[in-house]
Amino acid sequence: MARKVIHQLVDDLDGTVLEPGEGETVLFSLDGKSYEIDLTEQNAEKLREVISPYIGAARRTLAGSAVKAPQRTAVRRLGKVRDLSAVRKWAREQGHTVSDRGRVPEAILEAYDAAH
């Protein structure tokens, strides 16, 4: 048995069936989200008329693209996980000056690793 699949493009606003070569897909962005909608030429023109005052008062973004919401990235630890209180204690015993808080100098961390 044969099967024939027919794809029709339909105006997303009013349901008008768009024949091949008719209508258009309009892309737009708002509040950091991008959208696309298939419209007849008349509905695409109406959309452009409605938003034209806003576009005229707006400023363009980089490359005219939508501003994307910041994405969260995983925090990666680089290097070894060390007990810094033990490192500070060892460093003082070795005659190094180390603060009670904040970063421990890399040279001291390397010396601690070499000694342990």
Image (spheres, helix red, strand yellow):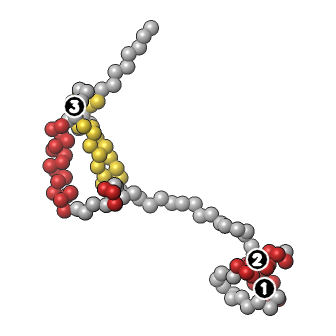
* Place of residue 84 in the rendered image (x, y in percent of width and height, measured from the top left): 73, 78
Residue on which disc 3 sits: 22
Left or right for 60, reference 82? left
**SS at mark 2 in the image:** helix
Q: Amino acid at mark 1?
A: Ala
Q: Are marks 1 and 3 in contact (CB under 8 Å)?
A: no
Query: From this viewpoint, which residue is outermost toward the top?
Result: 1
Q: Is residue 15 visible?
A: no
Residue 91 - label:
1
| Marked residue nearer the N-terminal end (1 or 3) | 3
Q: Residues within 10 Å of mark 2 (few under 14, many from 20)?
A: few
Residue 46 versus residue 90 in the image, above or below: above
Measuring 25% from the left and 63% from the top, which residue is drawn there?
A: 59
Tell me the quarter of the picture where residue 30 sits. Answer: bottom left
Report how far apart the C-alphas of labels 3 and 2 lie in the structure.
Answer: 69 Å
Residue on which disc 2 sits: 110
Measuring 20% from the left and 35% from the top, which residue is drawn there?
A: 40
Q: Amino acid at mark 2?
A: Glu
